[in-house]
Amino acid sequence: MQRSLQWARGRLINVTAADQLLRDLAELIQEVELSTQHGQQGCFGYQAPVVFNRGRGRSLYLITREQLSFLKSCGFTAPQMADILNVSLRTIRRRLRQYHFTRASMYAELTDSALDEHVQDIVAGNEQIGPEAVRASLRVRGLRVQRRRVRASMLRINPGAAALRAVLRRPERRTYQVAGPNSLWHIDGNHKLIRWRIVIHGAIDGYSRLVVFLHASNNNRSSTVLSSFIRAVVSYGVPSRVRTDRGGKTMLSA
């Protein structure tokens, strides 16, 4: 119907009447889509209005720069903005690019001296408070500051306290002991390149840290891991125990 009205505009009916009919049709479509969506979700919320487009293509949602600026100042992410305005994530990202919103624009424009004053006021002699707690306090004040800037500011204000926190909060590593070579092998896989059909499997001796096998293949089957394990056994001997994760690819090796 919309295409028919656009074709008839200026031919069968005058331009003003055609534009009004197209505008009413766009509002009707929006109301139907919104009612259907609410009926499925069982909730009612805000819906960004649609602006009628006289040219070709779909009508545009009316999302202003002020709306996006307010939502960004409140700390909402792009998916959350899409849920609030009841539009698609692609629409939000397209409008953010259109209004030149970047990741850097999310943060407050503070000089180092002004940031040091805020951090000094928040810390107030408490040498145990960490950078994340300071960032949360700054966020309460309406200031979003990068983590690296907060850490640099705390280092400038009190370098001794920063060094003390680094020493006291260092995690204590557990003691790892293995009886001897071939006493325990660790097998694991890496799937970060699986979208390019590259899967890496490897095993290491727990005592000597010797990599007994490291193989890249185009699948994640347990038979592939087993063949690499057998070749490692032929070269280095049979291990007393094998430790793997709970995945199914290493079941045959175990």
Image (tube, rainbow, N blue to C red):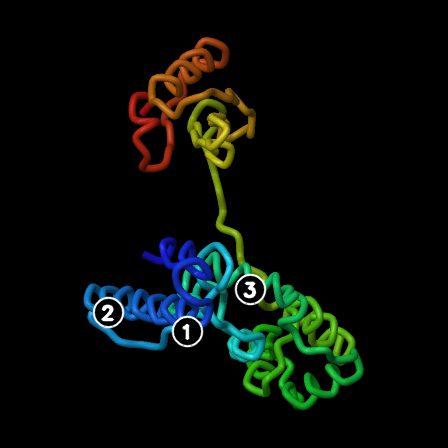
What residue type is disc 2 on? Ser
Query: In x, y percent, where is residue 38?
Result: 24, 69
Q: Of discs 3 and 1, which sits in the foreground?
A: 1
Name which quarter of the figure residue 238 lies in: top left
The residue depicted at 60 percent of the width and 77 percent of the height is 135
Q: Amino acid at mark 3?
A: Arg
* Separation of residues labelled 3 and 1 (CA atoms): 15 Å
Instruction: Give the secondary structure at mark 3.
Output: helix
User: Looking at the image, can residue 203 be seen?
Assistant: no
Which image quadrant is residue 125 in?
Answer: bottom right
Q: Position of residue 170 (x, y in %)?
A: 59, 62
Whole-Å distance between the Cαs marked 2 and 3? 25 Å
**First in sequence: mark 2 vs mark 1:** 2
Q: Which mark is residue 162?
A: none
Secondary structure type for disc 2: helix
Question: Which residue is disc 3 drawn over?
Answer: 95
Q: Secondary structure at mark 1?
A: loop
**Looking at the figure, which quarter contains the C terminus?**
top left
Number of other residues with Cα within 10 Å of mark 1, as a class: few under 14, some 14 to 19, many 20 or more: some
Q: Is residue 35 left or right of residue 186?
A: left
Q: Are marks 2 and 1 in contact (CB under 8 Å)?
A: no
Q: So how many labels did they put on this image?
A: 3
Q: Which residue is mark 2?
A: 35
Name the residue at the top extreme.
234
Q: Earlier in the sequence, mark 2 or mark 3?
A: 2
Front residue of this view, candidates 51 and 125:
51
Label 3 neighbourhood size at 10 Å, few (<14), some (14-19), many (20+)?
some
Closest to the observer, 240 or 115: 115
- Residue at 62% across / 76% down in the picture? 144
Q: Is residue 114 left or right of residue 127?
A: right
- Marker disc for residue 49: 1
